[in-house]
Image (cartoon, rainbow, N blue to C red):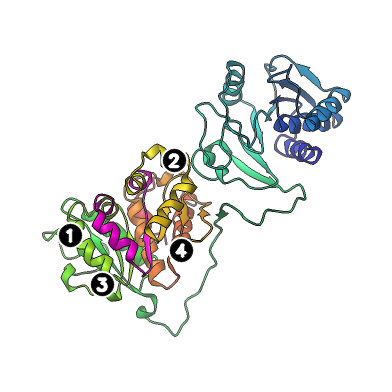
């Protein structure tokens, strides 16, 4: 606790170097003890910490009580109510324990934290955020930065955590990390230059099967993303027989009727704009496709058809599913709220049930496969909440898969690239799926 409090105090100096008055609301457990310890150091360094205790009559744990005494002896001010004006708030109310119903006093304090102009530093996790799942309570702290102690918690990087935590800092406190992590964070994939002595056949062939009447754009977005993502050749098998057999903006795409495509040699991206028409093609795709990415309407068809589910689970060839939370809920026959309540558990359940790689899209996209520690993607932002960006991701995964990276590896790299493109988008410029597809 002493090391934790020192780390919090040091970061407080870094994020608010000119701040004088610092409000530190402390909870009844060890998180509050970290706040007491931070107040002790800040007082010794000439700051004016003001500590308020959520339950002032409650006896804190032994270590927290010792830190509280040190803070009092250093001259830290303990107040009954938050100060009206302060330069920084250090949220030390609740940490990684079970989220409990907040009383009126705690709720009022969190609302003040969230509405006051001062910056907020959360200790370990923002109060009210579940450390493992990232699910936020109805009222939870929205911090400008969070100092995660001992380990990085999965909930900081997915669901509500992406918005609640702000900038995330980490301090191991010189404690050895656990050997069995629940997840890993993705990082920037290594850049690999293409060898000179290669040709278009060296980078695989992708076929996009989708684009029912009125939805051909989804298939074209996936196909363009596969092309820009590096696929050697990209075929388009539209489900709308009346559609133009040419993409005049991307003439490199080769249009074929689906009965002309030899699925046994192709990485197939199926379902983008597929409507109900894609269902009739799925039995053949599930049996024959050399490699397969299933998105959108293909997933909905599988969710509603046990025979397709049986074919999917029997596949031994590389397969990637790319559901958003509603599609994942249909595949698991659960409400969407259950998926979002524990995204890591949900994506692993999907991977184990359907015996393939699964990309659960959303805030902090998660990638899972059987017998593999899942990955939480560290790139991306809300600009991707736009029509067609999921089709772009499916096509990009297809390109990575065709290049020979393996299903799990291809999914992780494509998801990171997809998010990184949004992170690097010019400020103020609208992100559209068509422009996004051209960035890879």
Instruction: Name the residue rendered at 74%, 37% in the picture.
Output: 8
Could you tell me if residue 247 is visible in this image?
no
Disc 3 vs disc 1: which is toward the camera? 1
Give the camera-side residue of 31 and 266: 31
In the rendered image, the quadrant that contains the N terminus is top right
Which residue is denoted by mark 1 in the rendering? 280
Q: Quadrant of residue 385?
A: top left
* Left or right: 249 in relation to 167: left
- 310 magenta-colored: yes
Q: Residue furthest left?
A: 242
Dot 3: few (<14), some (14–19), or many (≥20) neighbours within 10 Å?
many
Dot 2: few (<14), some (14–19), or many (≥20) neighbours within 10 Å?
many
- Considering only order in the chain, which callout, 3 or 2, is on the residue closer to the N terminus? 3
In the rendered image, the quadrant that contains the C terminus is bottom left
Which residue is denoted by mark 3 in the rendering? 263
Which residue is denoted by mark 2 in the rendering? 340
- Considering only order in the chain, which callout, 1 or 3, is on the residue closer to the N terminus? 3
- Circle 3: element type: helix
Whole-number angstrom distance, CA of label 3 to CA of label 1? 15 Å
| Circles 1 and 2: CB atoms closer than 8 Å | no
User: What stretch of residues is rendered in magenta?
Assistant: 301-328
Q: Residue furthest bottom?
A: 197
- Residue 243 higher or lower than 254, as above or below: above
- 23 magenta-colored: no
Check residue 376 in the rendering and tell me which mark sits there, or answer none. Answer: none
In the rendering, at what x and y percent does residue 380 appear? Answer: 48, 49
């Amino acid at each position: 606790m002493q090391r934790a409090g020192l780390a919090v105090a040091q970061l407080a100096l870094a994020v608010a170097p000119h701040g004088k008055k610092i409000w530190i609301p402390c909870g009844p457990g060890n998180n509050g003890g970290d706040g007491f310890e931070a107040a002790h150091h800040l007082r010794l360094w000439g700051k004016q910490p003001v500590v308020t205790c959520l339950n002032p009559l409650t006896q804190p744990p032994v270590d927290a009580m010792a830190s509280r005494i040190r803070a009092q002896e250093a001259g830290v001010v303990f107040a009954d109510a938050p100060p009206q004006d302060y330069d920084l708030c250090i949220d030390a109310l609740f940490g990684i324990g079970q989220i409990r119903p907040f009383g009126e006093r705690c709720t009022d304090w969190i609302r003040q934290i969230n509405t006051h102009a001062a910056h907020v530093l959360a200790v370990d996790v923002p109060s009210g955020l579940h450390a493992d799942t990232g699910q936020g309570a109805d009222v939870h702290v929205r911090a400008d930065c969070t100092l995660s102690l001992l380990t990085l918690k999965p909930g900081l990087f997915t669901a509500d955590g992406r918005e609640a935590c702000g900038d995330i800092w980490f301090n191991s406190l010189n404690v050895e990390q656990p050997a069995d992590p629940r997840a890993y964070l993705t990082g920037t994939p290594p850049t690999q230059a293409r060898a000179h002595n290669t040709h278009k056949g060296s980078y695989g062939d992708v076929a996009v099967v989708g684009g029912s009447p009125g939805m051909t754009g989804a298939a074209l977005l996936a196909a363009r993303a596969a092309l820009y993502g590096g696929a050697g050749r990209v075929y388009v098998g539209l489900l709308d027989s009346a559609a133009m057999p040419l993409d005049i903006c991307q003439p490199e795409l080769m249009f074929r009727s689906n009965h002309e495509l030899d699925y046994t040699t192709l990485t197939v991206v199926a379902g983008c704009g597929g409507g109900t028409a894609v269902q009739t093609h799925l039995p053949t795709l599930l049996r024959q496709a050399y490699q397969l990415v299933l998105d959108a309407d293909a997933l909905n068809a599988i969710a509603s058809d046990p025979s397709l589910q049986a074919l999917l689970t029997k596949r031994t060839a590389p397969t990637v599913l790319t559901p958003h939370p509603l599609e994942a809920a249909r595949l698991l026959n659960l409400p969407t709220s259950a998926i979002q309540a524990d995204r890591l558990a949900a994506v692993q359940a999907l991977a184990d049930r359907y015996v393939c790689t699964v990309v659960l899209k959303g805030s902090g996209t998660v990638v899972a496969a059987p017998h593999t520690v899942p990955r939480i993607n560290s790139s991306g932002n809300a600009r991707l909440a736009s029509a067609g960006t999921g089709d772009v991701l499916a096509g990009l995964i297809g390109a990575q898969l065709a290049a020979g990276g393996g299903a799990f590896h291809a999914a992780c790299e494509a998801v990171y690239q997809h998010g990184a493109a949004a992170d690097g988008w010019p400020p103020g410029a609208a992100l559209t799926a068509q422009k996004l597809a051209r960035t890879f």
